[in-house]
Amino acid sequence: MTDRQLQGRKVAFLVGPEGVEQVELTEPWKAVQAAGGEPVLVSTRPGRVQAFNHLDAADTFEVDVVVYDATVGDYDALVLPGGVANPDVLRTSREAVAFVGQFAASSKPVAAICHAPWTLVEADAVRGRRVTSWPSLATDLRNAGAEWVDEEVVVDTSGPGPLITSRKPDDLDAFSRTLVEHVAGVRA
């Protein structure tokens, strides 16, 4: 992997104002930066977002763009970090769900880890797709029309664009590597 393979590429990281699992935000973020890409923090409110290490408050991060000002055309990929509360908040935001749905209908990569596929369910973006997630979401994903599997990283290319999913923080190396590979394949 070259350190500049994502030069000129912007990747949106969509999170709620609180509840994102910090490592599921920071590790893919670092991978995008290390590959020369520009990660952009998108949220439902301006200001700072509160990350968590499981149930304990961790660091805060400055929001770059509020989702109602975000346009799919400005980004080469979308990352949905997990955390139990984070996707639950996002799926109640009409603007966040619309943004995810527009991304899922594009040819651009969408990557979701752990509990993040809950937002994909709300955007009706998993029907007919093969995915993985934190195991407790398996029934929700199947009920939404997805084929759920228990694998480290799953790339489904049966839809408009690649859908990349992983189960948990232990899968972050594979998730981040796969994300970078697929963003590198997007035409600038």
Image (cartoon, rainbow, N blue to C red):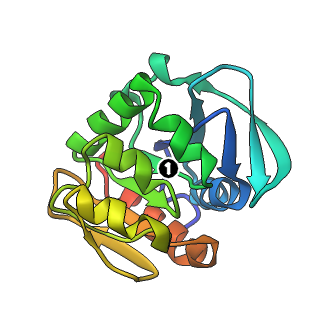
Image quadrant occupied by the C terminus: top left
Q: Residue at x 74, y 22 (%)?
A: 47
132, above or below 110, in the image: below
Q: Amino acid at mark 1?
A: Leu
Q: Is residue 110 visible?
A: yes
- Asked if residue 161 lies left or right of residue 27, the reply is left
The kind of secondary structure element at disc 1 is strand
Q: Residue furthest bottom?
A: 151
Q: Residue furthest top?
A: 69
What x and y, as percent, mark residue 87? 52, 45
Q: Is residue 163 visible?
A: no
What x and y, as percent, mark residue 141? 32, 61
Q: Which one is in front, 18 or 183?
A: 18
32, above or below 173, in the image: above
Q: Which one is in front, 41 or 169?
A: 169
What x and y, as percent, mark residue 27? 66, 62
What x and y, as percent, mark residue 180? 47, 62
Q: Which one is in front, 151 or 10?
A: 151
Q: Which residue is the site of mark 1? A: 80
91, above or below 84, in the image: above
Q: Residue at x 49, y 44 (%)?
A: 11
Q: Residue at x 24, y 55 (%)?
A: 144
**Total number of numbered discs in the rendering:** 1
Q: Residues within 10 Å of mark 1 (few under 14, many from 20)?
A: many
Q: Residue at x 38, y 33 (%)?
A: 97
- Asked if residue 117 lies left or right of residue 33, the reply is left
